[in-house]
Image (cartoon, grey):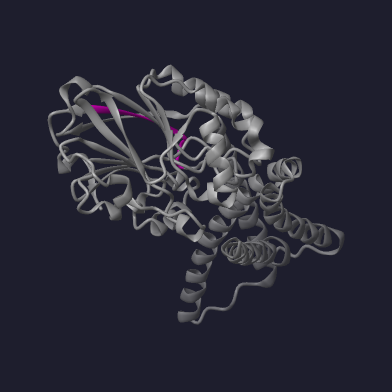
Amino acid sequence: MLSLVALSAVSATIQGLLHYYAWRRLVRDTGLRGAARTSATIALIALMVMIPSAIWASRLGAPGLAHALGWIAFPWMALLGLTVVALAAIDAGRAAAALVRWLRASPPVDPTRRQFLARLTGTAAITAAGGTVALGARDALGEPEIVTIEVPLARLPAALDGLTIVQLSDLHVGMTVGRHFVEEVVARANALGPDVVVLTGDLVDGSVDDLRARVAPLADLRARRGRFAVTGNHEYYSGADAWIAEYERLGLRVLRNQRVAIGDGDDVFDLAGIDDHIADRFPGHGADLAAALAGRDRSRALVLLAHQPRQVRTTDGHDVDLQLSGHTHGGQIWPWHYLAAAQQGGLLVGDYRHGGTWLHVSRGVGYWGPPVRVGARAEITRVILRAGQAPTRKQMRST
């Protein structure tokens, strides 16, 4: 709980600074006066407060309030962020022009002209951001892209060549993601005819009691050789033990530092899963790859499920052939993807090589916060395993 409070405090500080900058550029610098200035100021304060209120309403058992606030606060979060980016770029250009004028000893810009430029650039920034949010909402709420990758595994038996794994990640059911969304994702996953379905964490944002009906369609996932899941950080924010029990009730096998054999007789490979990177902050939880792989037969190919891409750093010496991860959403909204990439050590989206391990980072099929994706379309991943060869460096970026 303390970590959540600290995270909320940092988030509130950042949101406060963004809203202040927006107020300064769009209200003060544009010369709004009287009722217009007061109304705009109150609206910005109210919108700023709505964002943490929606998040905490979800976590504290008020799903109806979280839903109502979320559909206002989170689109606004995206609009604000993109507007601030546009305004910052404009202001950087204005600062450069001011520096040139100063170096040339030119007279300062007339205050009336400065106010006109503030209004003009503010309008342009909001318009551009609004159009981008509209397009981003289409990508977040529309049909996800089916991303197909073929992964050659040297130790995979020939009898399993062509085995298909469908990966779903980061649904974030809750707030603005409801049952209908889950039903559509399940239908699209089933249409791919998978042998195995894996869910790589962050499936929920809220308690089991609040979201049980929304996640119920996950029970309808179909796979010939099993349905498996691992925890993500948001499971821990939402009550991991209760969610693990609920996932199991829905027919998902949750791999908590465990592995299972997929196949028949001697024609098998190992599928392992570990707890999320932050799980060790919670009693009885914590990623432990060594425990998951204890006593394994190293002649078998090994596929690992780990929510956060950076967990690939723990695979050294364990002969992991493939790791499937999510967490980053591919950045979700450009240019904030730079922050997601930095948090994961540069592992943002797509395929990477770490030692002998192939890592695929899914963009996720849902979204967190704003129902908006910019430069990071939603993804359902279809992994086709191929037998008899190892991946080449040309197929992956090195970590």
Q: How many marks?
A: 0
| Residue 372 appearing in the image | no
Residue at 25% across / 53% down in the picture?
399
Instruction: Look at the picture and state if 17 lies above or below 363.
Output: below
173 w.r.t. 111: above or below: above
Decide if residue 151 is on the left or right side of residue 253. Answer: left
Q: Residue at x 67, y 58 (%)?
A: 119
Residue 259 appears in view: yes
Q: Which span of residues is magenta-colored?
A: 375-385
> In the rendering, at what x and y percent does residue 70 appear?
69, 44
Front in this rendered view, residue 338 or 249: 249
Q: Position of residue 49 (x, y in %)?
A: 73, 58
Residue closest to the eye, 287 or 45: 287
Q: Tell me which corner region of the image, top left, top right, bottom left or bottom right, holds residue 229.
A: top left
Residue at screen point 62% across, 26% down: 180
Q: Is residue 150 magenta?
A: no
Q: Could you tell whether 38 is left or right of 339 in the image?
A: right
Considering only vertical position in the picture, is 186 above or below 319?
A: above
Q: Let me know if residue 378 is in the magenta part.
A: yes
Percent across and percent down for residue 325 are 38, 43
Quarter of the image where the N terminus is located: bottom right
Q: Nearer the viewer, residue 71 or 279?
A: 279
